[in-house]
Each structure stands twice: as C-alpha cells, then as structure tokens.
Amino acid sequence: AQSAISHDEKDNSDNTFSRDFSPAFQSEFEQLMHWRRDVRRFQKDKPVDEEVLNRALSSAFHSAPSVGLSEPWRIVRVESEAAKEAVLQNFEGEND
C-alpha cells in the first residue's frame, strides 16, 4: 500500500527537479487547504503547550522561504502586559 505522503522525485535531463505526488496525498493536501483558517481571536487565558508551539514555529519557519536562505527572522516571547503594550505601540507607530 502506498503512503498518502509518498512521492517520487525525478531529476530531468534539463536540470529541473519535479515530484509526482500520489493521488491520496494530493487529495489530503487539497482538503488541508480548504480547512485552513486565519485566527484573529485567541483564548488569552489558555496557555499553549510548549511542545506544540515549538513544533509549529519550527515547521513554519523552516518551511518559509527567505532571501538567499538567510532566515532573518527572530522569535521573541512577549509575556508581560507592559511589554505587549509597548510592542503594539511600536507596531502601530511603524504602520501609520
């Protein structure tokens, strides 16, 4: 049985690279794209599990392209209300 995430990698003679993903993977990926959501409201009183957060950030930032693969982003945890307010004021000041 073929795994839903399996794919075949091909090196073509013209130095291009392509992948042939299984129909099951293509279907699951299409469903995932339909299910995705942009969350704008958060449960501030419910902490996010540290392992879940680390896995999500690692996956997102290692998958995101950057200029010259420089990966210039930095992740900072802001916990205090005063620091959150300072971040918001800085953001709003830069985006007027």
Image (spheres, helix red, strand yellow):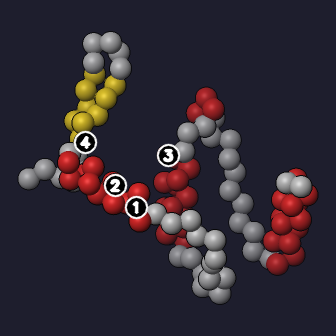
Q: Is residue 80 left or right of residue 29?
A: right
Residue drawn at x 62%, y 83% is 43
> Disc 2 designates what residue?
30
The residue sitting at 34% across, 54% down in the picture is: 30
Disc nearest the viewer among 1 and 4: 1
> Which of the 4 image quadrants contains residue 71?
top right
* Direction from residue 9 to residue 96 in the image, left or right: right
Query: Element type at marker 1?
Result: helix
Q: Are marks 1 and 2 in contact (CB under 8 Å)?
A: yes
Residue type marked 3: Ser
In the image, taking residue 58 as reference, residue 77 lies left or right, namely right
Q: Residue at x 41, y 57 (%)?
A: 33
Q: Which residue is mark 1?
A: 34
Q: Earlier in the sequence, mark 1 or mark 4?
A: 4
Residue 83 visible in the snapshot: no
Single out the residue that lies furthest toward the left.
Answer: 1
Q: Which residue is mark 3?
A: 63
**Distance from label 4 to label 3 (Cα)?**
18 Å
Discs 4/3, front = 4
Q: Which numbered mark, 2 or 4, is in the foreground of this view?
A: 2
Q: State the CA–CA distance, disc 3 to disc 2.
A: 18 Å
Crowding at mark 3 (Cα within 10 Å: few <14, some 14-19, many 20+): few
Q: Looking at the image, do the residues carrying marks 3 and 1 touch, with CB atoms under 8 Å apart?
A: no
Q: Which residue is mark 4?
A: 21
Up/down of 3 relative to 79, above or below: above
Provide the secondary structure element on which disc 2 rests. Answer: helix
Relative to 35, say whether 64 is above or below.
above
Q: Are marks 4 and 3 in contact (CB under 8 Å)?
A: no
